[in-house]
Amino acid sequence: MPHGLTIWLNQITKPMSEADHNTEHSILEAAHKVFIRKGMDGTRMQEIADEAGINKALLHYYFRTKEKLFESIFNQVLQKFSSKVVGVLMSDLPLFTKIERFADTYINLLLENPYAPNFLVNEINRNPERIVNALKGQGIKPDFLRQQIKREIEAGIIREIKIEDLMANMMSMCIFPFVARNIIKSMLEMNEEDYMAFLIQRKTEIPKLLIGYLKTK
Amino acid sequence: MPHGLTIWLNQITKPMSEADHNTEHSILEAAHKVFIRKGMDGTRMQEIADEAGINKALLHYYFRTKEKLFESIFNQVLQKFSSKVVGVLMSDLPLFTKIERFADTYINLLLENPYAPNFLVNEINRNPERIVNALKGQGIKPDFLRQQIKREIEAGIIREIKIEDLMANMMSMCIFPFVARNIIKSMLEMNEEDYMAFLIQRKTEIPKLLIGYLKTK
DNA sequence: GTCTATACTCTGATAGAC
DNA sequence: GTCTATCAGAGTATAGAC
């Protein structure tokens, strides 16, 4: 029994073996490539088939519908990004260290997957429930962070701030320059090379700003 | 001669008269409503026709193609947002005042047009050239701001910062919570009411953070 | 498992009457 | 200007041979 499930299970259990270099795997690779650039509505099954070097019929043999194929890719991408958030923020590190690690690992991840934030954000519009449901089981515990911030405020390490603002600021500053890449680039009259350097330098610039503001002494 | 141009010209010259309550105007209204939620690829001409209370043939009579109709809406939305940036940032106000005004006017604009940033951002993917070209004639002068920042750094009013980072931070923190509304809402386990209050309160929270960091004394 | 051929639906766009 | 009817093409999905 093919139909997507096996591949999807393989992907999260096995790391990557020569057995994955089969048709299922190349379909997923091709689908990822096309979906992440063009989204659900903008993608044509023919284009995925071409990219994978097969025909449309075979796509439907493995993943019954376009919707199901899309879902596989969507879950995979969301998982990759949310696991980074959880890994860094739900640990026992001090807040300032978390901020530094978040900016560093997240921007690195974004540099490797520059189309992912737009892809995810587009899907918010198209199907808000999907992303809300998918986030449920990811182990994000806002109260855990809320407690940490409360403790560090009381200990006089940081100044008053709400977790909502801190999270929103941190995520916004890391992600938005990728989402609105061409707008910002164009507004500030930057070329591709400059913009690349700009993004990289923000791995340290964002923590500098946030910590600089939060630090009490 | 119908075909979009007249309406478009009317929209930017006349404020809004009873003469605009004609078919052209209701088509533009309907198209705005549908396009801004579903984007170019996700929108069906039939849906716009239904929304406007007319039939598809009439759509094509006024705007020859879907692409042309979309372009009208796109330009209108982009114009509305970029003119706010220009109005605030390309003035002769001190930097701290600009930051305060930007956050206030921009978030107000976003509260009135919550779907606009996703709409614009989606179009970046689909057609990067369009947005880059459309931004050309908007009167954004990065060097003007760059000079001001330089002067205020030299005058000891603000600490060292690059215009690229300042602009990116300011825009990111204002806009991203609208773009990723459902993600952030879901991650932080907020309801719609809380999130609304959160967005409004950021009109003062964002300048507080930016100015708090930039202030030298 | 993989292919070719095709059914069927949706959608943008046009023809032509009024 | 506005409508009904319809075309032409694209796109998802399936049938059936190999």
Image (cartoon, coloured by chain):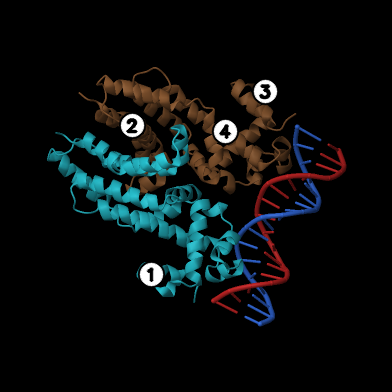
Chain colours: A cyan, B brown, C red, D blue
| Three-letter amino acid code at the position of disc 4 | Asn
**Dot placed on the residue nearer the N-terminal end, 4 or 2:** 4
Mark closer to the chain start, 4 or 3: 3
Residue bearing mark 2: B162
**Residue matched to label 4:** B75
Q: Quadrant of residue B170?
A: top left
Identify whether A14 is placed above or below C13: below
Mark number displayed over residue A16: 1
Q: What secondary structure is found at the residue carrying circle 2? A: loop
Describe residue B28's horizontal placement relative to residue A6 as left or right.
right
Q: Quadrant of residue B74?
A: top right
Q: CA distance from mark 3 to mark 2?
A: 48 Å
- A197 in relation to B161, above or below: below
**Mark 3 crowd level (few <14, some 14–19, many ≥20, 10 Å Cα):** few
Rendered residue at 29%/40% (across/down): A206
The residue at 16%/39% (across/down) is A153
Identify the subunit bearing mark 4.
B
Q: Are marks 4 and 3 in contact (CB under 8 Å)?
A: no
**Tag 3–tag 2 contact (CB < 8 Å):** no
Tell us which disc is closer to us: 3 or 2.
2
Q: Residue at x 68, y 27 (%)?
A: B6
Please give the residue where the numbered disc 3 appears in the rendered image.
B19
